[in-house]
Amino acid sequence: MAIRDGSAILFVVRPFDRATDMPAFVRLRREIEEADRSGNDVSEQAAVSTLAWPGHDPARDRWTAWIEADPENMAGYAFTWAQSPERSIVYSAVRPDLRRRGIGSRLLEAVIIRSVEAGSAHATSAVDASNEAGGLFLSGRGFTPAGENRIMKAGADVDSPEPVWPAGYTARDLASVGDLHMLAEALNGSYGDMWGHTENSPGIVDAGYLQREIETRPELHDPHGVFMVFGPEGDVAGVVAAFRRPAGPGREPDLVIDSPGVLPRHRSLGLQKQLTLTAMRWLRKGRPAPIALETFGDSPEAFGIYAGLGFEIEARFIEYCRKLQ
């Protein structure tokens, strides 16, 4: 479809065509990163990898924009990806010199329509906290803030002492627990009210779901690196996962802690501290190394705990949500 806005720019929005659009897609990602400095990997390999997300169909879930005066260079792109059966992640980006011309709005509208067709009840989109224009863009199109995501980093010199648990609390790894039903209980109870997790959708995360995840990406689901905390009555109190993200070109594997979670009735004890230390010690195995902490929808109290352990903010995002149906 061709659209002419008030500035007399004629642009076309159409579905992504992998056979012809990849070179322009790679160039556009690099132009956007050069202007925005968001820290995104804009290599050709990274661009190709975005087309292979599980359940993502680039031909139906991805849209592109082109202007009449420059048909060789992509003006913008957008995608939708179903994070769960009821929620889709949506994203829209425009070449820096073509922003505020209506292109981003039209691209976003296209992926919202696709999300509704796919049955999503909510659309969600994360914006760097420093990107005021991005937040205003989403707010003006029916999105409201729903949570905060942070990427934090502890350097190799940050200590990771033995965790001291409150009386009656103990931690065990999944390898010794050996029960995916119990892990699902821990995940749903800990993350159900923390926006940005699949567990926000009741009934999605169960033992079968977890088994499929483990079989699909075993390198990210080492049962020795998943820890559950149990309270004095033997009830599940919290969970944390630690993994080694596979190495990329010219770099070592990343050591990552994935969003420590605590069930609401246990949160007053600040168990995120002990969970984080447990994960740090398992990742390091006695050797100093930097560690990334990725947390989604967490509370200010939890962020304070991580900072107290020596983690510093590398990136901070506001998660916006829009109800679709």
Image (cartoon, rainbow, N blue to C red):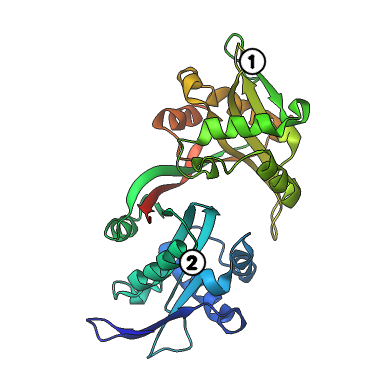
Identity of the residue drawn at 52% across and 77% down:
16
Q: Crowding near pointer 2: few (<14 within 10 Å), some, many (20+)?
A: many
Q: Is residue 193 above or below residue 146?
A: above
Q: Is residue 192 above or below residue 321?
A: above
Identity of the residue drawn at 60% across and 78% down:
18
- Nearest-to-viewer mark from 1 and 2: 1
Q: Is residue 33 above or below residue 316?
A: below
**Percent position of residue 3, x then y:** 32, 83
**Percent position of residue 72, x then y:** 48, 88
Q: Which residue is mark 2?
A: 79
Report the Cα–Cα distance between label 1 and label 2. 44 Å
Q: Quadrant of the C terminus?
A: bottom left
Q: Is residue 310 left or right of residue 234?
A: left
Q: Is residue 210 left or right of residue 196?
A: right
Q: Is residue 192 above or below residue 238?
A: below
* Dot 1 amino acid type: Gly
* Dot 2 amino acid type: Phe
Residue 55 visible at all: yes
Q: Secondary structure at mark 2?
A: strand
Q: Is residue 111 left or right of residue 46?
A: left
Image quarter of residue 42: bottom right
Asked whether 158 or 323 is in front, the reply is: 323
Q: Which residue is mark 1?
A: 234
Image quarter of residue 208: top right
Identity of the residue drawn at 33% across and 58% down:
138
